[in-house]
Every structure is written in C-alpha cells, then in structure tokens.
Image (cartoon, coloured by chain):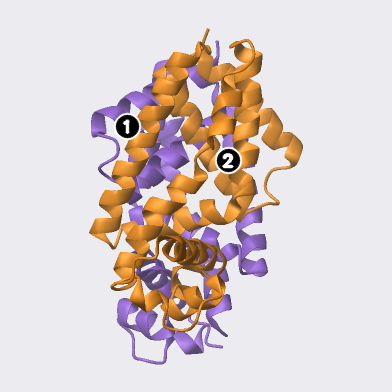
Chain colours: A purple, B orange
Amino acid sequence: MRSNPERRLALIDGAIEVLATQGARGLTFRAVDTEAGVPAGTASNYFTNRDDLFTQIGGRVYERLLPDDATMARSREGTPDRARFTELMHELVQRVSSFGSGQLALLELRLEATRRPELQAVLTERIRRDMDENVAHHAASGLPGDATSVTLLQLALNWLILERLTLPGLFSEQQVHDLVEAAVARVLND
Amino acid sequence: MRSNPERRLALIDGAIEVLATQGARGLTFRAVDTEAGVPAGTASNYFTNRDDLFTQIGGRVYERLLPDDATMARSREGTPDRARFTELMHELVQRVSSFGSGQLALLELRLEATRRPELQAVLTERIRRDMDENVAHHAASGLPGDATSVTLLQLALNWLILERLTLPGLFSEQQVHDLVEAAVARVLND
C-alpha cells in the first residue's frame, strides 16, 4: 500500500464526490482516479478493496462535516441566550447543507453500513463521539437547554437537511427557517 | 407492457426487498425476478427501464409504510391527551422500524431521486401529501399540539428510525424510548 498522506486524502475526497453524485453503484477505483485527477491505477495502490475504501471514507467525511476551529470559536461569542442558540442552529443548517456532497455521501455510507460490519462499527463510534462532543460543548457554552435538547435538535435538523438535499421542492427556504426557529424554541422547554 | 396487477405488485414488492438488502447497485431486473420467484425475463415485461422501476417503487413503498385502516381506527380510540399521543408515537416508531426494508428502500430512493428527476417529483408529491394528511388527521383527533408539533415530531422520529436501522448500536432500546417521550413532551410546548 502507498502512503503519501496528501494523495490519500485527495483520493478519499474524490471518492466522497463520486459517492454523492453517482451513488455507491458508481464508486469504483477507476471513478475515484478520474475524480481525483490522478493516473488510472492509483486508487488501487492506496486501498486494499472497496470495503477498505468505504471504511476510510467513513472516517474522513465526518471529519469534513464538523465545524472548523474558527467556526467553533465564533460559536462561543455573544450572549449565550435563546436568540444566539437559534442563530447558531440556522448557521449549522446552512453550513451542513452547503457541503451537500458530504451529507449525501454519509447517507450512502449509512446504507452501505447495513451490509458492511466494519464500516458500521466505524460510523457508530464516530457518530457517538460526535454526539457526546456536541452535548459537552453545549453544556460548557452556557447556552440554554440540556443534553436532551441537543440530541432532539440533532435528530430534527438532520432530517430537515436530508429533505432539503434529496427533495429540494418539499420545503421552501422560509419553511426551513421557520422550522429551525420552532425546533429550538420547543426543545428548550423552558 | 404486461398488466397483471397482482404480478406487478409482487415484482415491485420484490424490488423493495432487493433495494433494501443490496442497495441501488443490486437493483437489476434479474434480481427482481429472482426475489419475486418468477421466470427470468418477467420484470422486463412490466417496466420499460430501471428509471420506470424506481418511479413505481416510489409510489408503492410509501403506500406500504402508511398505517392500515385498523391501525388508523385504533389511533382514534382513547382519551386524546398527551399520554395517548406519546403512546401513539411509540407505536409509530415500532411499526415503521418493523418494516425496515421499506424504510431502507425509501432512503435508497431518496438518494436516487437526486439523479432521477421523475422519481424526485413522485416522492416530493407523495411525501407532501402524507405530511398534509398527518397534520389534518392530528387536527381532527383532538390530540394536543399544533401543525408544527406534528412536523417537528416527524422530522425527529424519522431520523431516530434511520439511526436505529442503519447503526443499531448507536442508541439502546431504552434511549429510543426516552427520546420518543422527550420529543412528544417538548414539541407540544404547552
């Protein structure tokens, strides 16, 4: 196996795009080589098989969906009240929706996980860690709401983003906005 | 095109199982024939192409995910209070989760819809109608909560079911139960 880390990342990022645009059906080493703009045969030097490729995408796509340090730092600014919480959730929905290929690739991976035990283990561990981190980050922020508020928001907003990405005609921008407002207001339960 | 309605349904139901277990990648006319236990070549007499097959699955899978008349009648029994609403939502999560192949097939279809405009139109229309019917049914039931309660619950519970089906190790049965309780209590906002 080759180990140039930059090239490996470029191949995995290419694989995310292939997965999002062509589905699991289209994810071949050849398609990844083409998407990453590298010579044919490169991907096969970096991944032992498709299973390995899926597992490595599972680790990477989640990393790219998380907020970067600047976004995290900004999220701690301002008065930690309900209005600020709502604003942060609007930003979250915009940010995740704007990396649509990552979100779609992650859904393809979730479906593949029903058939690939190793991928299922990687995703379960990764998503559990992310949920725990979200709860801890929220608790430290001083924002209103408890751990249940954070989990329920995550459930509702994830499905809202899924609707937006797969059936864009279902909700208008205004409806998405209003649902985010209502979701925050109601899960706070104060 | 052949038009025996029972055989068409058997083929589409077979296609739902193929989609859930093998993914969009595995959905071929041959696999559908095998799953439905009919002679090779049958599916190709009922569907003009894979696109047509996807679109017809889109109409059918949703129909099978809806509660039957007996379930709907039972949902109108009892005192329409918060406890009854919570009970109905627990039943909903169990019912939809128990037709896991339907729910997984629907997710495969949503992802395919990003690449198939006709399927996207069918699903958008179908899901919008279902959401409207849910809101109307709820309003007529006398149960607590408004249209926003119904929509937010649908978002949160759909994602909860998705987690359960694709990453069954993520939440325990107890956590699923507690999240349903909390979701109902908070979206009611009374």
Give the x, y percent position of residue B105: 49, 58
Q: CA distance from mark 1 to mark 2?
A: 19 Å
Q: Chain of mark 2?
A: B
Compared to residue A177, the image places residue B45 above or below, namely below
Q: Which residue in the rendered view is the most extreme toward the front?
A: B4
Q: Is residue B51 left or right of residue B7?
A: left
Give the x, y percent position of residue B106: 46, 53
Compared to residue A168, the image places residue B48 above or below, namely below
Q: Residues within 10 Å of mark 1 (few under 14, many from 20)?
A: some
Q: Nearer the viewer, residue B41 or B175?
A: B41
Q: Which residue is mark 1?
A: A176
**Three-letter amino acid code at disc 1?**
Val
Q: Is residue A178 visible?
A: yes
Compared to residue B99, the image places residue A32 above or below, namely below
Q: Please give the label number shown on residue B160.
A: 2
Q: Evaluate if marks 1 and 2 touch, with contact meaning CB atoms under 8 Å apart.
A: no
Q: Nearer the viewer, residue B5 or A185?
A: B5
- Which residue is painted at 51% across and 45% down in the image? B65
Q: Residues within 10 Å of mark 2 (few under 14, many from 20)?
A: many
Q: Is residue B126 left or right of residue B12?
A: left
Q: Chain of mark 1?
A: A
Give the x, y percent position of residue B163: 59, 47
**Three-letter amino acid code at disc 2?**
Leu
Q: Please give the label number shown on residue B80.
A: none
Q: Which residue in the rendered view is the most extreme toward the top?
A: B190
Q: Is residue A183 visible?
A: no
- Which residue is painted at 40% across and 60% down in the image? B5
- Quadrant in the picture for the C terminus of chain A: top right
Q: Nearer the viewer, residue A13 or B73?
A: B73
Kind of element beneath mark 2: helix
For residue A116, which quarter of the picture? bottom right
